[in-house]
Image (cartoon, rainbow, N blue to C red):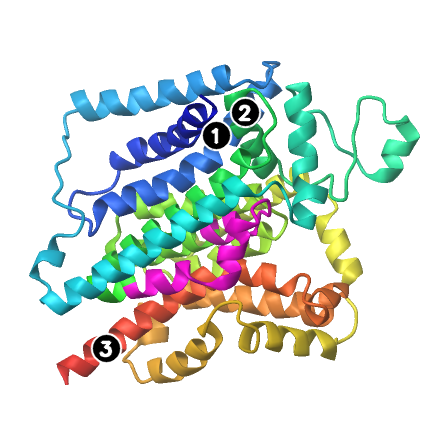
Amino acid sequence: MDMLLTILALLLPVLLGGMWLNLLVPPGACARPALVWGNGALIGLLLVPQFMWGLDAVGIPLSFLSTGLLTSALIAAAAAIHRYGTKRIRTGPLDAPFRTLPTAHRLLFLFLLCLVGLRCVTLGLEILWRPLFPWDATMHWATKARVWFEYRSIVPFVDNHTWLQTGGQGVFTDRHPDYPHTIPLLQVWMNLATGRWNESLMNLPWLLCFIALGAAFYSQLRNAGAAPVVAMAFTYLLLSMPLLNIHVALAGYADLFLGATYCAGLMAFHNWVSTRWRSQALLAAFFAFACLLIKDEGLPWALTFIPALLLAPHTRHKVAKLAVLVLLGLALLGVLMQTHPLFITQLLDSVTEFHPDGLAGTIQAIWLHDNFHLLGYLLLAVIPLALTLPAAFTKTYASISAALLCAVVMFLFLFLFTVFGAGASNFTGVGRLCIQLAPGLLFLCAMLCNDLLTRGRAT
C-alpha cells in the first residue's frame, strides 16, 4: 500500500505539469511527448511544494488530502480544457524522424536508450535501499522536512542566536534556517502520502527529477535542430555523469533540482529565441523564477537571464528592453528581500583577496576528477572550433552563451575571491555548484557539436 501511495504522490506532479503544458506546446514540436512530460514533471515537482506553502499560509494543516485535492482539481481542469476546448491537439509518435534513420543509427539510439533506462533502474534501487545519508541533506534540508511533517505545519526555523533567546519556544534551528522551503516540502509531500516518515521513499523525487531532466534535455536538443542520434548521445552523456548520478543515489541535496531547473530555463530560452513559441517563453520565465525557490545560489543563476534577454532579437525597441529589465529586477529584488534578506550583505562580507588554492581546486574538480566525464575537455575543444562557425556566438547562440558566461564568471568569483574558496580547495562545494551549471554547458556543447557535424557533412 505504501508503494501505491508513493507512486500516486509521484504521479500527481507529473500529471499537473504535463497536462497544462500539453495545452501550450505546439503540435509540430519535435519529440513533443518528451518535451511536454519532461518539462511538465519538473514543473509539477516545483509547484506542489508551493501549493503546500500556500495552504499552510491560509491556516490549512499540511496533508496529502488537501494538497492532493487541489492538484487533482487543476489536473481535471486541464483535462477538461483538452477534451472540450476548441483547439484539439493531435501529435505523431515520440520521434517520427527515428523511422527514417539508417538501421545502424536506430540500433545505436536504442542501445543508448537502454543504457539510460538501466541507469535509472539502478539509481532507483539505490534510493529504495538506502536511508537518508549525505551530510548536508541531514543538516540543512531534512531537518525542516521532519519538523514540518511531525507538526503538519511550516513552523519557523531561525538562527542559533534567536533560538537561544526564545528558549526554543515555537521555533527550530539548523545549519541554514533561511534556505528556501521547496525541497523540504517535497520530502514532506512524499511522507504525507504514506502517513509516516520514510527516509527512502521520500527521496524518489530525485529520480523523477533526473528522468525529467533527461527527457527535457533530449527534446529541447531535437527542437534546437539536433538529429535523434546526436540528441540521444548527449542525453546519455548527461545522465551518466558520475556526480550527477551520486546526487540521485545519495538523494537529499538541492543541487540536482537547481541544475535541472536552470538548464531547463536556458534550453527553453534558447529555443524561444529560435522559434518564438510562447510555450518556450513561458517555460523560460517559469524556470528562471523557480531557481529562486530552490537554493540561495538560484539568485545569481536567475540574474543571468537578464543579459540573455538583452541579446535576444525579439524586443525591437530599447525602451521595451529597459522596461522588461526593470520589471525583472524589481521582481527579483522583491523575492530576494522576502526570502534572503541578508544574502547580499553576507556575500559582500565574504569577499576577500584572491585564493590560489580555490583556483587549483576548481581546476582539479573539473579537469582531473571524474565528476563530469570529459565535459571540461569537451568545452576546451568545442568552443574554439565553434568560433569557425558563422555568427555562432554573435547571433545563433548569443543569448545562451551570454547567460552561461555570466554564470561561469560568478562561479569563479565565488571560489576565487570569497571565503567560499575553501569549498574549492577541499572539494566540499565546488563539485556541487558544478552540478548546477554542467547540464546547461553540455546543452551548449551539444548544439555546437551538432552544427560542426552538420557543416562537416555539408562540405
Mark 3 vs 1, N-terminal side: 1
| Distance between mark 3 and mark 1 Cα atoms | 41 Å
x then y, percent, for residue 314: 31, 56
Tell me whether the residue at label 2 lies in contact with that at label 1, contact meaning CB atoms closer than 8 angstroms: yes
The answer to whether residue 198 is visible is yes
Q: Amino acid at mark 2?
A: Met
x then y, percent, for residue 326: 52, 49
Q: Amino acid at mark 3?
A: Leu
Q: Nearer the viewer, residue 328 or 434?
A: 434
Q: Quadrant of the N terminus?
A: top left
Q: Amino acid at mark 1?
A: Val
Segment tinted magenta in the rendering: 233-261
- Relative to 94, is 378 above or below? below
x then y, percent, for residue 402: 45, 67
Residue position for label 3: 453
Q: Quadrant of the C terminus?
A: bottom left
Q: Is residue 342 left or right of residue 231?
A: right
Residue position for label 2: 52
- The circle drawn on residue 48 is 1
Question: Which residue is at 27% across, 80% downward?
Answer: 390
